Each structure stands twice: as structure tokens, then as C-alpha cells.
Image: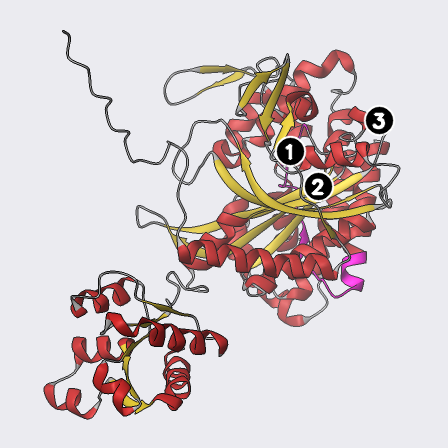
Amino acid sequence: MAKIKKQPRPKAQTPKGFQDYFGADVTARAEMLSTIAGVYHRYGFDALETSAIETVEALGKFLPDVDRPNEGVFAWEEDNDWLALRYDLTAPLARVAAQYRNDLPFPYRRYAMGPVWRNEKPGPGRFRQFYQCDADTVGASSVAADAEICAMLSDTLEAVGIDRGDYVIRVNNRKVLNGVMEVAGLSGDDKEAERGIVLRAIDKLDRLGPDGVRALLGEGRKDDSGDFTKGAGLSETQADLIMMFVEANAAVDRKLLSSQAEANDLEDEKTRAIISKRVAEVRDAGSVEARKVLNLPVESLAARNRVTLRYLSEVVGESNVGQDGVAELEQIAKLLESQGYGPDRIVIDPSVVRGLGYYTGPVYEAELTFEITDHKGRPRNFGSVAGGGRYDDLVKRFTGQEVPATGVSIGVDRLLAALRATGRIDTAAQGPVVVTVMDRDRMADYQTMVADLRNADIRAEVYLGNPKNFGNQLKYADKRASPVAIIAGSDEFDQGIVQIKDLILGAEIAKNATLEEWKDRPSQYEVPRDQMIAKVREILDRNN
């Protein structure tokens, strides 16, 4: 008789591209989401929670590849229909706005928070499940809605602990790029293929630099591995026009630094002096180098916005759509400044080219500007933690009618990582007070103690493991990062007292103090039972 083969034990490991979150991380995220929700609620946005599962049809063109429904999303077929875990929080909003359009107030202002799933190759810092936190206005065509989102994003970053000066919200407009395409002769259905290549090339500016983008506008580019990417085949004149937009920031930097006429736009002498001093340093510098040197006061940033808008107006020339885009940017800047959101927080920046195939008007991105050290010990800017823009075509898929919409999405996990990297949130949460068990028969008394602590709003628990080895109870309290242990045996109960051990102070003394200091700084206190709560609170206040 054949031997029955034993079923192998399953491997206890997290699936690739996913991660587990424990106490401190879960608590920090919950607190952050609560803070963000408070800002959104103050702005008049309502919470919305949709199903984690949508039909692939509802997700539509916003999937990476609509011809393969299981590519890019976790999808499965059920009753001749394809279902998928939601890819983001925006596509479900479009479905809700269409499904409940007769019941919802329009404009509809909603925020949503929760995990999303992407069936993509994981990598360092790139996971298949992550949290998003979105806020959107559906049904408002005015750019006042876009300006409001930017202001709310600024308030949100400061509310969670990002200091002013450590972030910037950069705003651009897809219509400006459409205008550049028009003056370059790339509008019309017959130019769709060339436009696609151009848009993809511009989107790679950060990675390839201006020279790499320029090559892709022409015949093409060979990368370091020898692979050749075919370009858009534009003429020199067409490529020059596109590059005027691509290198707008560098051009504006040079205008501000080298032209006395532009310098006169800067009203204070201090700013003009700074500019004059730095002309020689960055006259021929590229955008990145110039912007590192440009550390000008707020007054000059406002002038930079004006110079940028004039430059973009020149680039789009007589294109009506392009000029509309510039006018919208100018209006957004004015609306924000009227509310006190100046260019020290929110700036016009043509380098923002996110979601080129998705957004239809203003686009914005929140970037953290402080330096951190990467996994190889190299200093770098933290980078983007949020982005969004206007997407007027999304709801139209369901209704056949254009419904204007604009919104922002915050990468919650990235924002938490930024706060940890700068020490703005604790990496480990404080554990509960632990009531140890010295006498099994007095469990009711221990439970009374812990109930008293909880009723006083002190986080506490009774040790529920095997109480035989008292040392193991203290090791447990240490693993729980407990600040205090309560100790009481038969003698303490008979005398109406408890022993209260300050575990944080005890650890410090054991680590650093001499024997004399240890004697002078006791970490364990004997107090009457009715003074237990007061003493515990005193220790907690001292250690916070």
C-alpha cells in the first residue's frame, strides 16, 4: 500500500509586493487619516466609501491595458463579467457620480480614503497594495475649484506636520501643452501617433534630461544598453518649440538672473542684489543647478510667477487653447494669493507634466523639499507625496455628457515615510501599562485595578500569560514598550498598597547610571492603592 504523502506546511511569508503593518504603523496612519479628514471636512467635503471591487468596464481606459483585463489590476471573471480590485479611488467616484446623479448635490464634494491594488511588478518602495487619500469636486467648471484643492492640500500638509518652507505645491495646465502642440503643428487626429511619442518623451524629462527628450523628439534615442527607441521624427523647428516648453524653468531662471529688465520686476533692493550677485554663477547653468542657487525671498517668487506666465504666453503664441491655459494659471495664482496662499507655498511650474493622457486642465503636485538620505547613504530631496488635476472626461464615459471634475490624491504611506525620516512622528508607539499577576487567586483584584486605570483614560492590560515566572512578565512588558508595570502580591493586598515600576526610567538607569546614581534614582515606588492612578499619571506625564 502506497504511503500517504504528507501535505507540506504552508510558508509563513507575506506575498511579494505586499507588506504587514503593526501597532505603531497602523496607529500613525489612522491618526494621519483622521487629521486629513478633519481638514477636508472643514472645507465642506463629505466622506464617501465605495466597494473595493469594481467592474473592469467601470475602470475602463484608466487601466494600464484595456485589451488585457487582468493586466495592471487583480481581476477575475464571474458570470461572464470581469471584476477587479479598485486601481485607484477616482474611477469609483466617476461611477458613483453617474449612478447617483439625481440624488447627489452638484457640485459634489467628496473625500475617500483606503487601500488600492495594482498588479504591477513590485520594487523598492513600490507595493501592490497601498493607501490613497483623495478629495474631489465633481460638477464645477470654474478654476476656483482647482485653486481650492491646492489651498486645501497646503493646509493638509501643514496639519500633519510638514513645516512651511519644507514643501511646495507646483501648478501647471495641460491646456498650455496642448497650445504648444498646436503651434508646433501637432494637433489633429492625423498627428495622434506623433503626439503620443512627444508626450511620453516629455514625461521622461526627470529621467532622461533635456538632451534625452530632444533625441526622442527627433529620430530617436539609444540607451546605455544599446536599445534604440524610435522618436517622433519632428523637424528642428517643431522640436525647438517643444523644447521651449520643456526647458521653461531653465529659461525663466536665466531671465530672472541675467536680465536687468526682469530684475526691476523685483521690487526690493535685497532681491536685486541677490540676483546681481548670482548672475555670473548661473548664467549658463541648466535648470537643476540654477534652481539650487536660486534661494530668493518670497517677493521674488511672486515675480517669478509673473515671468513664468509671460514666458508661457510667448511660447503658445496665437493658440487659443494655450492662452486659455495661461489665463487659468494666472487666475489660480490670484485666487490663492487673495486667500494668503502665496508663492512661498504654491507656485506656477511648467515642469509639472503628470498624467498627460488623463488630465484636461490644471495639474498640481505637492513636493517635499527637505533632504533625506537614501538607502545608499546619498542625500536627495524627498520628492512628491501628492498630485492631481482637472479631469473633465471621466464621468462622461457613463453619462455621455461632459461633467467637469478636479481632485487630488495623497500617497499616505509616502507621507508617513517622510514624517518618519525627519523625526516628526514616533517610530514606536508607547505600550499599555501592564498589571502583573503575582497570585492567580486574586485575578478579580487585578481586573479591578486595570478597570480603574482604563476608566481614568489610561491604556492598560492585565498579563494573561503564564504568571509562574515573574521575569517573563517584565520581559513581556518590555516587548510591549510598556511605560509602567503594576506589581501586587498577597502582602501588598493585605497592606492596601501597590508597587509601581517606572520601566522607562529603569531602563535608562540600568543603561547609564552608576551604582550610586541607581540608589539615588529609584525606579520603583510603593504607594497606597488609592493613589495608584495619580502616581501612574505622574510617571506617564514625565516620560511624555
Left/right placement of residue 364 relative to residue 206 reads right
Question: In the image, residue 33 lies at what x, y percent?
Answer: 58, 55
Query: Dot 1, how many residues are within 10 Å of its Cα: few (below 14), some (14-19), or many (20+)?
Result: some
Lower position in the chain sequence, tag 1 or tag 3: 1
Q: Give amino acid for label 1.
A: Gly
Determine which of the numbered discs, if any, sits on residue 355 in the image: 1
Q: Is residue 373 visible?
A: yes
Q: Nearer the viewer, mark 1 or mark 3?
A: 3
Asked whether the residues under the numbered discs 2 and 1 touch, taking CB atoms below 8 Å apart as contact, a structural biologist would say: yes
Which of the image's four quarters has the N terminus?
top left
Question: In the image, residue 138 lies at what x, y percent?
Answer: 80, 41
What kind of element bears circle 3? helix
Point out the residue furthest to the left here.
Answer: 515
Asked whether the residues under the numbered discs 2 and 3 touch, taking CB atoms below 8 Å apart as contact, a structural biologist would say: no
| Range of magenta residues | 335-357
Query: Dot 3, how many residues are within 10 Å of its Cα: few (below 14), some (14-19), or many (20+)?
Result: some
What kind of element bears circle 2? strand
Which residue is labeled 3 in the image? 399
Which residue is labeled 2 in the image? 389
Lower position in the chain sequence, tag 2 or tag 1: 1
